[in-house]
Image: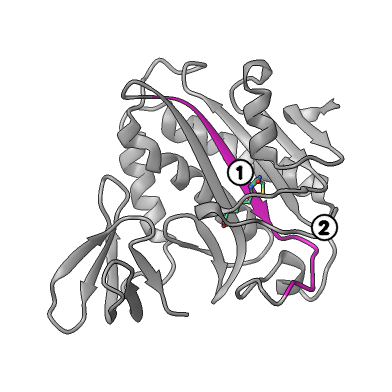
Amino acid sequence: MKNKNDIIWLDSTDSTNAEAKRRISELDNLSVLSTLSQTKGRGQAGNTWSSDDSKNLLFSIVIKFGEGISQRFRAYDQFAISQIASLAVTDFLSEMGIEAKIKWPNDIYVNDRKICGILIENSLRGKWLSESIVGIGLNINQKNFDVTIHNPTSLSLETNMKEYDIHTCLEDLTIIFRKYWERYFIIEDGLNVLSRLYLSQMWRMDEMHQFRDLTSGIIFTGIIRGITDFGHLIVEDADSGTKKEFGFKEIGYLI
Ligand code: BTN
């Protein structure tokens, strides 16, 4: 069923990212595929994503880089997709009265609790980005989580157990995402502006915290100072003052 704003709602599927990939040839740029229930929800690094049925947002947005824009994007630019997805979610939550932050690279946190996870799968044609599937799991009405889930929260838990209509939430969030796309991917120099915005919303930015260097296993005290053009995290070692860059899965936060 296709309804307003091009959102395709499915009662159930294995994973909206997998379903979007299967239907990629029939989906237009910025189409949204959403479900009430996932049987094999996928998370980052091969993890699973679990959600009670009909409680949360589980959806994927398809980006087709050949459509609607003349500019071409390099593989190198793929971090910008994480940035628009993360900022769209923090803006949506801000409209709902919640101050959320982006835990690099693209988890969304409210204080020290995770409210949203994002899984982006990109396809390249040579050195150019051709398609991206942006999978977003945003906890809305769920109040009890499995004990194996680390520090979860939901919109309802953050707002005195209020209940939300998930269809309306998705329509609102989709509108914000599409605005980000138009604002930053279509105009020249948009990506630089986007990086500055992303930095302004980063969780634990310029604060002293403990981290684990996942390559050496060493725990150290550091301060997040920014991100590189490539999307790597820059952390200053609090003892030595030296700055180091970390890729995804090269650094862990101690929460
Ligand atoms: C993470 O590990 O934090 C990323 C979780 C991403 C979950 C969403 S739910 C909708 C989409 N479909 C999936 O199978 N995964 C993403």
Amino acid type shown at disc 1: Gly
Local packing at callout 2 (Cα closer than 10 Å; few below 14, some 14-19, many 20+) is: many
Q: Could you tell me residue 57's position as x and y percent?
A: 73, 51
Amino acid marked by disc 2: Lys
Residue at x-position 80% and y-position 46%: 168
- Residue at left 65%, top 36%? 18
In the image, residue 8 lies in the stretch drawn in magenta: no
User: Between residues 70 and 250, which one lies in front from this camera angle?
Assistant: 250
* Residue 23: quarter of image: top right
Q: Position of residue 25 (x, y in %)?
A: 63, 16
Q: Which residue shows up at 34% across the image and 35% down it?
A: 77
Q: Quick one: 210 or 30, which is closer to the camera?
A: 210
Q: Which tag, 2 or 1, sits closer to the chain's start?
A: 2
Q: Secondary structure at mark 1?
A: strand
Q: CA distance from mark 2 to mark 1?
A: 17 Å
Could you say where residue 41 lies in the image, as x and y percent from the top left? 69, 50
Q: Which residues are magenta?
A: 129-146
Q: What's the mark number on residue 71?
A: none
Disc assigned to residue 55: 2
Ligand 1 within 8 Å of the CB at mark 1: yes
Q: Which residue is mark 1?
A: 135
